[in-house]
Amino acid sequence: MTFSSRAHVRSGVRFVESRIQRGAARSAGRDATIQEQKMTNGVIDVATIEALIETACRAPSLHNSQPWKWVIDGRTVHLYADNERLLPITDNSGRQLSISCGAALDHLRVAAAGADLDSHITRFPDPAAPDLLATVEFQRAAKTSEEDRTRAKAILHRRTDRLVFLPPGDWHEVSAVLHDIAIGLGARVEEIPPRRRAELAHVSHRAAALHRYDSTYKAELQWWTGRSTLPDGIPVTAVPSRAEASRVPFGRTFPVAEKQPMHRVEVGVDRSQILVLTTPGDSREDWLRCGEALSTILLECTARGLATCPLTHMTELPDSRSLIREMLTGSGVPQVIVRVGSASAWTADPLTPRRPLADVLTVRPTAG
């Protein structure tokens, strides 16, 4: 990631963070007026919406493909699926594209909440426009909770951590909160108990075995992995070495550089908690809502100082997805697996690259 692109990302997120901090000051009784930033006749200025969208683009996506497009049309934000960024081998149904866009949609909602704005979301508003996933309109929030502010700040710190974890602290409390979050956003969370971790590792290895001789899958994965200068894909610093990956028996098998240094050697084997995010059905709306739930779960964990790593390779193939479903007690459809744990910091840059805002956003001129 170049200095200029890094500065571009940080400039937008700093603007939103400053609005969050000013909102916190106002709630404490100090002199701050978040909505003074060109808030005319109840209409939020375009610069503010642009900053919120830039922050929303920090959302996770399959191989950091960032498969979304945004349009600002007056007071309304439109979120579109960018099918040109679909991974046709790994995600031929578009399921993970929709989950990724759902995460971006929820990041937008959370960023807006941190800036004292409520979001009115309409999902799939036009049956004749299937790529239009949602529209969002903003209005002043009557009240912003501390949870909203904390999660909004967490957007700037969340990252996918593929290394080993220690067990998360206060897990009973955290687990209860994550279950409530998922239910509130139309999904459910199930935990994989320790006695079934070996079974889950077997499913992960089986999924890898099914791809072992698939040259098209390997070529697609190689295309998106190990980048160092492009604004998308997984940077080489975010890919674990072969030795590191061997300590996390549930991870996706990436092409790696053998000479990468070892991190967290003191941890040993992975001791994370394993969650499975499920939905009532397997429709595009289920996928979108799953992404929204995933977003808030990741941000809640980040706000609590926990590390996370979403895993989707075990739900990509019908065979391994069925095996995951057999491990669950509920009737939901497994969509995403998430590792949650405690982790010491390491030297890699926690911010993976993002596409320039001009590449993902169109602002339609207003009349008059």
Image (cartoon, rainbow, N blue to C red):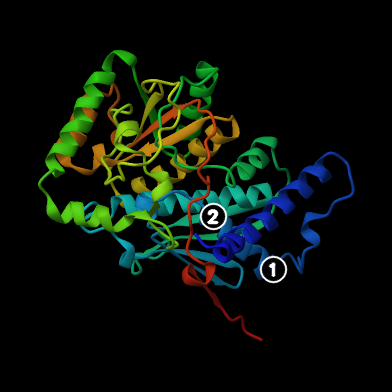
Rendered image: mark on residue 71: none
- Relative depth, front residue between 178 and 259: 259
Q: Amino acid at mark 2?
A: Ala
* Image coordinates for residue 81, horizontal then vertical, percent: 38, 62
* Image coordinates for residue 263, horizontal then vertical, percent: 44, 32
Q: Are marks 1 and 2 in contact (CB under 8 Å)?
A: no
Q: Residue furthest top?
A: 195
Residue bearing mark 2 = 56
In the rendered image, the vertical position of residue 182 relative to residue 213, given as above or below: above
Q: Earlier in the sequence, mark 1 or mark 2?
A: 1
Element type where label 1 sits in the image: loop
* Image coordinates for residue 95, horizontal then vertical, percent: 29, 50
Q: As drawn, is 49 to the left or to the right of 178?
A: right
Q: As drawn, is 131 to the left or to the right of 172?
A: left
Q: Amino acid at mark 1?
A: Asp
**Distance of mark 1 from mark 2, alpha carbons?**
17 Å
- Residue 243 placement: quadrant: top left
Element type where label 2 sits in the image: helix
- Relative depth, front residue between 344 and 156: 344
Badge nearest the viewer, 1 or 2 = 2
- The local crowd at label 2, few if under 14, some if 14 to 19, many if 20 or more residues have their Cα within 10 Å, is many
Residue bearing mark 1 = 45
> Residue placed at 28% from the left, 20% from the top?
197
- Give the number of marks: 2
